[in-house]
Image (spheres, rainbow, N blue to C red):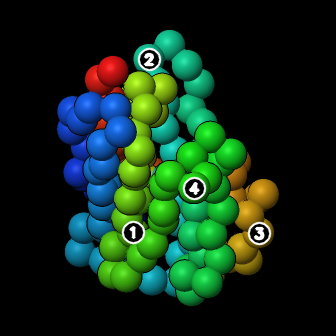
């Protein structure tokens, strides 16, 4: 499964962006999905995840209440009230087919088996 994230860009603090993640030639249905980000000089960190049914979601404390993950044939990350500390490269990831979903498990990179190239988000102050 090849994943492609898009929608990044430059935005002022307080602004919004919507990221998308799609699989080339294949559907993402039946796979739990996650978003991670990596800022320059920092380790990759979990942002949000969603179960394959869409009924379960989990967020990092730093984005809860500002970001919303959703899905249809693609997976989206709606980012509102962006802050300079949200500046990073955002990547999406897919878990094994119809794997069980638990929020805390989905926050670890090892939970996922497919990763896409990221999209860069820059938030200016």
Q: Earlier in the sequence, mark 1 or mark 2?
A: 2
Circle 2: is it few (<14), some (14-19), or many (20+) Cα within 10 Å? few
Q: Which residue is mark 1?
A: 75
Q: Which residue is mark 4?
A: 65
Label 1 close to label 2 by CB (< 8 Å): no
Vertical placement of residue 38 versus 59, above or below: above
CA gap, disc 1 and disc 2: 24 Å
Q: Which mark is residue 102?
A: 3
Could you tell me residue 3's position as x and y percent? Answer: 34, 58
Q: Is residue 106 left or right of residue 78?
A: right
Q: Residue at x 48, y 38 (%)?
A: 37
CA gap, disc 1 and disc 4: 18 Å
Q: Is residue 92 left or right of residue 14?
A: right
Could you tell me residue 120's position as x and y percent? Answer: 29, 35
Q: Earlier in the sequence, mark 4 or mark 2?
A: 2
Q: Which mark is residue 40?
A: 2
Q: Residue at x 48, y 65 (%)?
A: 69
CA gap, disc 4 and disc 2: 24 Å
Q: Earlier in the sequence, mark 2 or mark 3?
A: 2
Mark 2 secondary-structure assignment: loop
Circle 4: is it few (<14), some (14-19), or many (20+) Cα within 10 Å? few
Vertical placement of residue 63 versus 4, above or below: above
Could you tell me residue 19's position as x and y percent? Answer: 31, 55
In the foreground, 67 or 28: 67
CA gap, disc 3 and disc 1: 18 Å
Q: Residue at x 38, y 59 (%)?
A: 78
Q: Which mark is residue 12?
A: none
Q: Which quarter of the picture shows residue 8? A: top left
């Amino acid at each position: 499964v090849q994943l492609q994230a898009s929608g990044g860009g430059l935005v002022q603090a307080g602004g919004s962006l919507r990221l998308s993640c799609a699989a080339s030639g294949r559907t993402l249905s039946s796979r739990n999905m996650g978003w991670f980000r990596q800022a320059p000089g920092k380790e990759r960190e979990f942002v949000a995840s969603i179960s394959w049914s869409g009924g379960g979601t989990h967020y990092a404390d730093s984005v809860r209440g500002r970001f919303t993950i959703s899905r249809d044939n693609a997976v989206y990350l709606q980012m509102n009230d962006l802050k300079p500390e949200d500046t990073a490269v955002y990547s999406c990831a897919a878990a094994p087919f119809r794997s069980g979903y638990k929020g805390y498990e989905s926050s670890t990179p090892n939970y996922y088996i497919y990763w896409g190239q990221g999209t860069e988000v820059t938030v200016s102050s």
